[in-house]
Structure formats: C-alpha cells, structure tokens
Image (tube, rainbow, N blue to C red):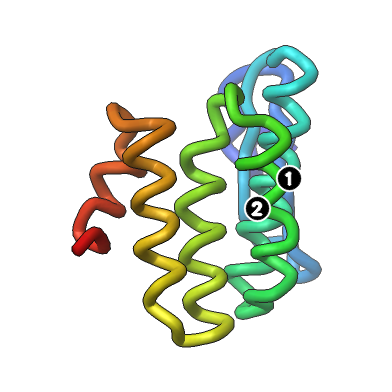
Amino acid sequence: MFKRFNAQWTPTQIILDAEGVERHRIEGFLPVEDFLAQVELGLGKLQFQHHHYAEAEERLRPVCESFPKAGAAPEACYWSGVSAYKKTNDPRHLGSAAQLLKERYPESEWARKASVWLQ
C-alpha cells in the first residue's frame, strides 16, 4: 500500500472515494482537533469532487465554525464558500467566504485566493 499511494511517512491516512481514487491525504501525527478538522476537510473535498455540493458544504462549514484554530480551517472555509456558490449559483457566498478569510486568516493562501471575490 505504501508504494501504491506513494506514502512517504507514517502515519499516513488517505481518504479514497468508492473507485479507490485518493481525494485527501493526512501525513504525520496531529493533535486531536487538527486531525478531526483534516478528516472533515477530506470528506468535504470528496463530496465536492463528486459534485455533491450541499453535502460538501455540510462537511466543510463546521470545520470553520468548530475548529477555527486548526490548520485545515482556512482551506475548509474557502471550499465551503465555493460549495455554497456551486450549490446555488449565488456569488454572495464567495464574497462572504472571502470576507471571513480576510478577517480570520488574513495571511493564509486561502485568503489570498479568495481576495478576488471581494468587491
């Protein structure tokens, strides 16, 4: 399995979809809060990648709200906003996500990526 998934370090947790395609990877030990946030981020990304935007948002939004200090939180906030937009086609979700990222995580790459959504 290490060779198949090119795992370089232990522990490595990989979230796969039903077809066995890797959708998210968690490498190394993490504190409990960070680990839980990473798992939820991975499950949200899996839903997003299969175009299940409502389910993706349901997984990702709580990471922003329940684990705001976790390393995965800025990415989850970004993808939560994108999921809400894809679900509704309402661009206000992108602006809200960008504003949240600007306020909470101004130095993150996710805030920079979302900055184009601010008006």
Of the residues tagged 1 and 2, which is closer to the observer? 2
The part of the image, by quadrant, that contains residue 46 is bottom right
Among numbered discs 1 and 2, the one appearing first in the sequence: 1
The label shown at residue 83 is none
**Label 2 element class:** helix
Q: Which residue position is annotated with label 1? A: 40
Q: Could you tell me which residue is drawn at 56 percent across and 58 percent down?
A: 80
Q: Could you tell me which residue is drawn at 42 percent across and 59 percent down?
A: 96
Residue that protrudes farthest toward the bottom in the picture: 89
Going by the image, does 10 lie left or right of 112? right
Residue 97 % position (x, y): 43, 55
Q: CA distance from mark 1 to mark 2?
A: 10 Å
Q: Could you tell me which residue is drawn at 60 percent across and 68 percent down?
A: 48
Going by the image, does 99 lie left or right of 65? left
The label shown at residue 61 is 2
Going by the image, does 18 lie left or right of 104? right
Q: Could you tell me which residue is drawn at 67 percent across and 40 percent down?
A: 65
The part of the image, by quadrant, that contains residue 19 is bottom right
**Label 1 element class:** helix
Q: Amino acid at mark 2?
A: Arg
The part of the image, by quadrant, that contains residue 90 is bottom left
- Number of labels in the image equals 2
